[in-house]
Image (cartoon, rainbow, N blue to C red):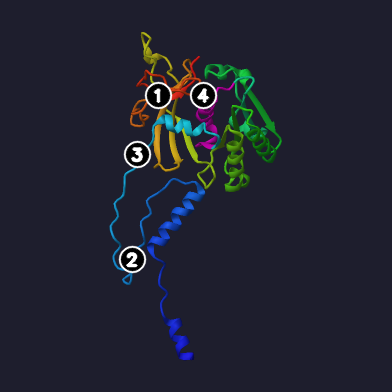
Amino acid sequence: MASSSSADKAKPKRAPPADLIASLRAAVARIEGAPARLVLPETPTEAEGPAPARPVAARRAPSASATLEAALKPGLAEIHGSETRGMGAATGFVLALGVLAAARPSRPLLWIGTGLGFGEAGRLYAPGLLAAGLDPAALLCVRARCLADAVWAAEEAARSGLPALTVLEARGNPAMLALEGTRRLHLRGRDGGAPVVLLRQSGQPESTAAPLRLRIAPGPSRPPPDLASPSSFVGRPAFALDVEKHRGTPVYRLLLEWNAHDRRFESGTGPADADARHPFRLSRDGSAPAARNRDVVALGNAR
């Protein structure tokens, strides 16, 4: 009996099948809301034999319009700035989202943060709001004493569905805005029927419940085309978007310009061009017009 037990202990344990490992990794990615990735199986053992070759279908990045629509869907979207001192681009992009969400005094853009966060990244400036196409009366700022109060205010606002867009600005990666905290924000926004943006100052990528995560940096803007010497003037605001997380898509980059006059995003230039294969613009009632402009790659609200 003793010799039989010793023989069982001496037998090497067989590794779990590669297919099981791959399926478990895919299940964890779905739970975390991470984009689907190709998971290659481990090197097969001699007992398992060679792994069969599997065809892999190439995935294409979605259009800029699809990315912006995802940012404005009810629920949570994450937007990061690389550094606190460079938050101007991320802030300007979120203000443009507020314009697209049709923020107005009766249904404002609600911006929530702490005094420390506003002091580090700067406060919103009324003339700058007008330059971005947003009525200053359509912005409501909440300065909380601490992050816990700011998170509570964001959850209650998202639950009510009254703001056109709720923005929670936070520094870095606090523990209360990890997977569980962002899950609550996402569910509150989804149930309230309004979008919520978690705006991180110099935050690092981590597992959260947000289906979409963007990293925003300033982009090269084109000079105005309708002036005698356009090179001596500043063009429209341009944003370089690194789409780090978008369910079912690979990581990709977009370059967009914000047209504050027409209240819409337009394709930028260079290698980071937005995908203009399916450009369109939505009217106020959400229907697509019959005529399409190939230069317009994102939705906007006509004046």
Please tell me whether mark 3 sits on a helix, a strand or a loop: loop
Give the crowd class for mark 2: few <14, some 14-19, many >=20 residues within 10 Å: few
Labels 4 and 1: the sequence-earlier one: 4
User: Label 4 sits on what residue type?
Assistant: Leu
Q: Nearer the viewer, mark 2 or mark 1?
A: 1
Residue at which label 2 appears = 44
Give the crowd class for mark 4: few <14, some 14-19, many >=20 residues within 10 Å: many
Labels 1 and 3: the sequence-earlier one: 3
Q: Disc 2 versus disc 1: distance between alpha carbons? A: 48 Å
Residue 233 appears in view: yes
Give the crowd class for mark 3: few <14, some 14-19, many >=20 residues within 10 Å: few
Look at the picture and state if 108 lies above or below 67: above
Please tell me whether mark 4 sits on a helix, a strand or a loop: helix
Please tell me whether mark 2 sits on a helix, a strand or a loop: loop
Give the crowd class for mark 1: few <14, some 14-19, many >=20 residues within 10 Å: many
Look at the picture and state if 243 lies above or below 125: below
User: Label 3 sits on what residue type?
Assistant: Arg
Residue at which label 3 appears = 60
